[in-house]
Image (spheres, grey):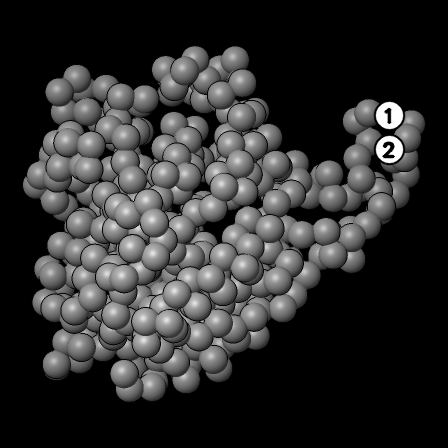
């Protein structure tokens, strides 16, 4: 599919912290067509380092399609011949330096100063991205969704939609994310963010254009990679191979192993598109997430009435399988149709993106079943 980024504008928006933002831009994409009954819409909230580019390509020569292209498109489980698929950016999107990201965040111009918001952008939560998407959905003429489906941070947002709008969300597909962020995930995220705040160029968030803490961002991504991509895959794909056959890592510090080189390349790429303040803000939003504002996961899940398909990976250490099974157990005991499916694979958390095709038929059947 060839797709395009679209813009939705909120004239005024009040964050959960009580700050008012004006002329808030939200980037979004749609795939397929809305039917006459306006009841075939599937909303796709995105992951931490993601955008609303869930499927298709902007241009035919793009090197890669959207992150869930394996399951979104004509004839695929989230079938765009059948469903109208909508995906929207979260506020303060991490990839703010990507030209395809147009959503309001720390890099946007503050109308009161004429400069970018920077570190003065209001603190946001995952719940703050829901009202904008809600107005977008309503503006498209949709009053009830067919489903919400998301991976990682997108799964957290999916649970939030199901809890806040039980009459709007009859089905939820949550991949690699649950109803609560556990302590271990909070700790991993702290480890990811430390290289940024320790970068001398960060200046407590007061860095200027052209002086971004890119070294810190790149190192943050390298640390993140070590938790989201697990050792069976790393050892199988790279092992102890040298990055260059003639450059022994034991002889020079500049000589790298193949996996080190891959880490560096991925880190540098993301440093070119990530805004450090946006990354830190989104990371904090994940750490502080509680379902429907309830500290107790049981109380939060009491609000959910949707049928739920939870998909997790046994090798995932970012979102551990036991926490996802806990959510399913809590829902099942309340009589909610909730099911857990294991997505086995060596890549850990990243199976939710790169291995999602292996549970494609599970997702298809779930979306086709009537509540």
Query: At x 44% / y 75%, what residue is drawn?
Result: 339
The local secondary structure at tag 1 comes to loop
The local secondary structure at tag 2 comes to loop
Measured as percent of width and height from the top left, residue 198 is found at: 54, 18
Q: Label 2, label 1: how many angstroms apart (C-alpha)?
A: 6 Å
Measured as percent of width and height from the top left, residue 221 is found at: 56, 37
Tag shown at residue 6: none
**The image quarter in which residue 333 lies:** bottom left
Q: Are marks 2 and 1 in contact (CB under 8 Å)?
A: yes
Q: Is residue 210 left or right of residue 190?
A: left
**The image quarter in which residue 367 lies:** bottom left
Figure check: 144 above or below 321: below
Q: List the residue tagged with mark 1.
A: 252
Figure check: 87 above or below 147: above
Q: Which quarter of the rendering shows the N terminus?
A: bottom left
Q: Is residue 287 left or right of residue 142?
A: right
Figure check: 110 above or below 260: above
Viewer-proximal residue among 194 and 298: 298
Query: At x 53% / y 26%, what residue is drawn?
Result: 194
Query: At x 36% / y 39%, what residue is drawn?
Result: 288
Q: Which quarter of the rendering shows the C terminus?
A: bottom left
Q: List the residue tagged with mark 2.
A: 249
**The image quarter in which residue 23 lies:** top left
Q: Is residue 122 left or right of residue 332?
A: left
């Amino acid at each position: 599919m060839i797709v395009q980024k679209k813009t939705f504008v909120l004239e005024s928006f009040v964050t959960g912290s009580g700050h008012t933002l004006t002329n808030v831009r939200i980037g979004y994409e749609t795939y397929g067509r809305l039917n006459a009954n306006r009841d075939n819409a599937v909303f796709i909230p995105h992951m931490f380092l993601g955008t609303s580019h869930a499927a298709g390509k902007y241009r035919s020569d793009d090197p890669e399609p959207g992150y869930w292209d394996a399951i979104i498109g004509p004839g695929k489980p989230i079938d765009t011949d059948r469903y109208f698929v909508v995906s929207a950016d979260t506020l303060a999107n991490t990839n703010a330096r990507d030209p395809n990201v147009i959503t309001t965040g720390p890099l946007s111009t503050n109308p009161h100063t004429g400069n970018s918001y920077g570190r003065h952008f209001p603190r946001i939560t995952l719940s703050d991205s829901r009202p904008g998407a809600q107005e977008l959905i309503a503006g498209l003429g949709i009053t009830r969704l067919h489903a919400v489906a998301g991976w990682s941070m997108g799964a957290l947002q999916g649970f939030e939609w199901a809890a806040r709008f039980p009459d709007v969300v009859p089905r939820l597909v949550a991949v690699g994310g649950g109803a609560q962020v556990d302590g271990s995930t909070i700790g991993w995220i702290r480890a990811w963010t430390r290289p940024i705040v320790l970068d001398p160029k960060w200046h407590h968030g007061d860095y200027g254009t052209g002086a971004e803490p890119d070294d810190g961002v790149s190192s943050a991504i390298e640390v993140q990679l070590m938790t989201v991509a697990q050792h069976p895959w790393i050892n199988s794909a790279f092992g102890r191979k040298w990055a260059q056959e003639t450059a022994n890592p034991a002889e020079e510090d500049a000589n790298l192993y193949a996996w080190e080189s891959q880490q560096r390349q991925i880190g540098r790429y993301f440093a070119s598109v990530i805004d450090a303040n946006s990354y830190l803000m989104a990371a904090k939003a994940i750490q502080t997430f509680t379902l429907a504002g309830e500290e107790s996961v049981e109380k939060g899940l009491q609000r959910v009435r949707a049928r739920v398909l939870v998909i997790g990976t046994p090798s995932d250490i970012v979102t551990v399988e036991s926490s996802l099974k806990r959510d399913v157990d809590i829902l099942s005991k309340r009589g909610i149709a909730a099911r857990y499916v294991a997505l086995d694979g060596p890549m850990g958390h990243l199976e939710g993106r790169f291995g999602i095709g292996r549970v494609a038929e599970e997702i298809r059947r779930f979306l086709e079943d009537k509540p």
